[in-house]
Image: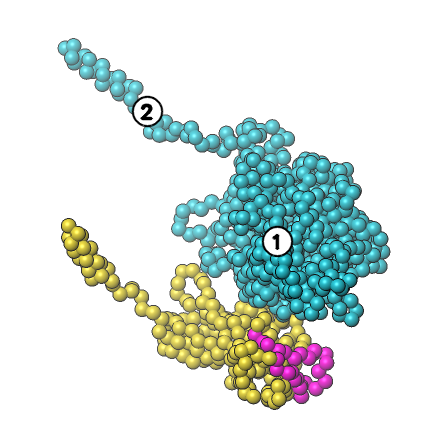
Amino acid sequence: MKIKIYHILFIALFAISIFSCKKDNYKPPTLTLSGKVAYKGEALQFQYNQFGFELYQYGFGRVGAIGQIFAPDGTFSALLFAGDYKLTIPNATVPFKWNQTVPGIPDSIAINLTASKTMDIEVIPFYMIRTPQITASAGKVNATFKAEKIITDATGKGIEKVALFINKTQFVSSGNNESVQTAELDGAAITDPNNITLSLSVPALVPTQTYIFARVGIKIKDLGGSWIYSPVQKLTF
Amino acid sequence: MKKIISIALLTFLIGFTGCKKDSDFLTIDPTSILNNQQAFSDPQQVVSILADLYTRQNDFSSFNRGWSSFADFSESFPSDGGAYNIVQRNDWGFGEWGVNWFDSYGYIRELNLFIARDSAATGLSAPDKARFMAEGRFLRANYYFELVKRMGGVPLILEQLKYDFSGDPTYLQRPRAKESDIYDFVISEAEAIKNLLPAGVKEKSRASKGAALAMEARAALYAGSIAKYGVTTPLVSLSGGEVGIPNAKGNEYYTIALRAAQEIITGTDGYSLYKNKTDLADNFANLFLDKDANNETILIEDYKVKSGKVHGFTTNNQPFSSGEESGNGDAGRLNPSLNLVEAFENLDNTYSPIPYRDGSGNPIYYTNQLDIFAGRDARLAGTIILPGATFKGQQVDIWAGYKLADGSVFTTQDASKLVALPGTTNPVQVLGKDGPYNGNDKRTQSGFYIRKYLDPTPGAGSRGTNSGVAFIRYRYAEVLLNAAEAAFELGQPDVAAGYMNQVRARAGLVIPLTAGQITFDRIVHERRVELAFEGHILFDLKRWRLAHVVWDGQKMTIPDLLTNIGTATKRNTQPYGLWPYKYYNPGNPNNGKWVYDVVLPNLVTGANKFQFGNYYSQIGSDVTGANPKIVKQPNQ
């Protein structure tokens, strides 16, 4: 009797495994849309998981966004189906200017995706960090850089403060737990934006490591606390 | 023949009596469901329909949404293993504090139906009918107010929407109204119904004239401040006005707020500040417990023991040592933070940190635990159970261990475990039964327990009985503060001082503030300490556009905590604690005295970060997808 039940179970399992598995109806998306947010080809640098964009695909009933995030080095990449898309950045607190069709309504970029595509999103940032020099020596990190104001007309914005951040991992920013030490300088205290110097002492790292990651950033005034950064640098002592 | 006759007769009978019209035959009134006319024929019946509608209001902090709706914003530490994310997250999601769109409009639909059915009712007396109608409109206006606080302008639906099953629902899609339109609606409804509602201080759990005016004053104040302070955050706006109110409308709204508040203050309905006990702290605590002789509450959500409508606020938050469910792990969840404690003023109207170190950084020794809090605003002890205070006649046992002569701490995680102190053999208790010890949840981890709304009635802290304390939606002290703020913004600081001094005098701050001393910071501060844990802080900081400044996502240092007390823009991102220790140094004159440490509970790893996209909660893509006319919130 027992053997019979086992047989039946076995046959049932066999039957299930044979007949139940069909391939999924839909193929997964295969086309990659990738690139970076750039000003004249140079990638902008952000905080991790801070700013993103939205993609809308034409041709379906309801409208819903495919939300995407820019990586700290300004790059993005999305796996998509072929089709017509619109790309937009709805968050007005990004540290660059995104055109608006009418005041308050963000503009969009039309993208026709038939094959994988690499495209840079050209924007005009409020500030760019030029020639950042970050060096480590004897338990100290020194940084010098130039804050270039790109938007100089009335829509430009001031500097709230500048800062040098260091962290144990490559996630370095003003965000909580994304820096082990910072050195700040108020925007009003900057005498020469072309030559800003910041330095800090490296605290004891637990567990010890012989390298740190560092970057400098500019906090832009009246922009909801948004920063723009220099590329992350790995410093080894 | 006989047979034929009888068959014919039978056929005739069947044909004659058997055939009713289909409609007569199939339409039978149900015996278990009341139709609209029946439901609206008897006042008792209508009240029971209203009771359901009253409970479905959406209060930010409320007993039926649980203790955690009182937590967050660094005003408290959540001592509950399941709620630590409140102090561990680094930002709030854009959907935070939002509403369930479908439930909300389902509720509004029922309110619209209620109003329509009440006006169609034929079996009600005219005064009943008018009052029910006004209550329905009050609930609807108050609910739109709750929506606009969270979402900005929303579609203003004031009638039942009927679908014609044509396959095309676009004619039902309504765009968002302007933010100011919703506030205007709330204000005009309040004006329209205030005289249809009963007046008088005794009417508390149902809408009254006072409630309508209190709602009007608060709504107008919110709208006024969004208009005035919105200019500091121009990015938080939408071009259609769904978010943001033109600056020019500010004064108009402040004027309405002041007028509505003054109508209550100078009116004859009998509202006054609660002053029934000689001990000012007990008096303040009792204001939230006393339902009978209380002329301060204007509108409450009532609860009643043994009625089925009870709540577990006391069960969840009572001190562990005297708790009635401590054995079952139900106690001590909501621990007010030192950040809030520091905000309570000295009796001479000055701000100063709780003195735990002297000028040269040495600890200050206190004979009694409560001495460190002496000479402060009575609302401190009325809102918060301080170390050494009593609850239900029993002193709370809050101390983090022994501090030894070398400054090290001698403690143990388990308060019931007796340990011999260094150099002795006699095991003693080395940790308070009420905490604090990092990670010991359901006991304080900040050094404080909540007192506001905590019910000392025996049994109120047990799950079987629970508490019948009412939740206050509007109270007179807030009306006074609303009037003070509106007057201040309208350039009448003397009027503002008059109202604020009434509230302050009740708390023992009897030295009146002069007109010159009334500043914006003073107003922000007064609301924080008077209205703590009543669901105001988020909306207040949002409307002043200070939320992104106060919760800026940066870690808070001890100097941050101890300086700039009373400044509106002071950072408040992490809840600190104040831990008492017994000083152990035999032979020293300070042996056995109390010392204190400012401590960041080590479970606090996050820092509150309020982004521009948080000012108005996200409207889900399910909503915007179904109705493309709904524009999205800014900066999300």
In terms of depth relative to the viewer, which is nearer, B135 or B3? B135
Which residue was labeled with disc 1?
B433
Q: Is residue B45 visible?
A: yes
Q: Counting residues from the N terminus, which is met first, the one under dot 2 or under dot 1? A: 2
Check the image and report above or below for B57 versus B247: above
In terms of depth relative to the viewer, which is nearer, B624 or B620? B620
Q: Residues within 10 Å of mark 2 (few under 14, many from 20)?
A: few
Which colour is chain A painted? yellow
Q: Identify the amino acid type marked 2.
A: Lys
- Residue found at x 59% / y 37%: B304
Which numbered tag is attached to residue B20?
Answer: 2
Residue ranking furthest to the top: B2
Which colour is chain B painted? cyan
Q: Identify the amino acid type marked 1.
A: Lys
Check the image and report above or below for B122 versus A197: above
- Residue found at x 72% / y 64%: B585
Which quadrant of the structure image shows residue A19? bottom left
Q: Which residues are magenta?
A: A178-203
Tell me how far mark 2 sits from mark 1, CA to CA.
79 Å
The residue marked by circle 2 belongs to what chain?
B
What kind of element bears circle 2?
Answer: loop
